[in-house]
Amino acid sequence: MESWMDFEALKTMTGPSYIERRNEVLRSTPNLVDRLLGHEKETDWRNVIQAKILLGWTTHRTLYENLQRELDAEDPKAAAKTVPGLNLIHGKYAKRAGLELKEDILPLCWEVLLKQAEQLPEWKIVTYLRMVEAVPHPLSLEPLLAYIESTPDYSLRRSAAQALASLPRKVIEGRVEQERSKHTEIADVLGVALREAR
């Protein structure tokens, strides 16, 4: 089926064209959930994460759309004028993720980091990173590493490394060391994540 062939294309797409194609796959692929469940056992992390993202949208579309609307309604300029600053927003969503949303929110966060980060303001990206940090899960390792590698912004790299440090040391140690040796430009933030990991 052509719409299922789009699954492969989704792994490399970003931005508005990704959203359009994702919605087409969700709308027009027969037996989508069964097909996606087959990808959860793959060794290629991009297949696993893309399947989780699509499964998240099939199961939690209302939650994801509501959360995105809530974030759009936030006033970062007003928050920045308060004593806690933008941490007021980041903390609110991190707390909600950790106490209420749990793992249900992770596919949306991964999607934002891998597919939409270039279109979003920094405060929103940090909010999604804080939600990932609030719900430590081994599957967050590769999306966080990919995001750290892809963003040229040091402060966003540092925020992503902070989320990475929330994962257990045994989960991240080998992969982080491997990436540190390959990418000197991100070695310092990965080193911080490793030192701060539990």
Image: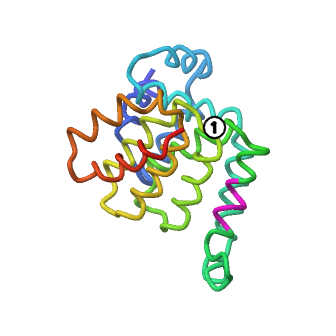
Residues rendered magenta in the picture: 89-94
Say above or below: 160 vs 10.
below
Q: Magenta stretch mostly in which secondary structure?
A: helix
Q: Where is residue 45 drawn, in percent x and y?
A: 41, 26
What is the quadrant of the N terminus in the image? top left
- Colour scheme of the picture: rainbow
Circle 1 sits on which residue?
A: 57
Residue in view at x 61 percent, y 29 percent: 55
Q: Quadrant of residue 32?
A: top right
- At a point 39% along the width and 48% down the height, the residue shown is 147
Residue 71: % across, % down: 66, 63
Queried whether the magenta region covers residue 90, the answer comes back as yes
Find residue 184 and report its horizontal and vertical position in percent: 20, 49
Is residue 31 shown in magenta? no
Q: Quadrant of the C terminus?
A: top right
User: What amino acid is found at the position of numbered circle 1 in the picture?
Assistant: Trp
Q: Nearer the viewer, residue 96 or 104?
A: 96
* Position in image of residue 128 (x %, y %): 57, 54
Please state which of residues 46 and 195 is positioned toward the viewer in this rendering. Answer: 195
Q: Is residue 191 left or right of residue 63?
A: left
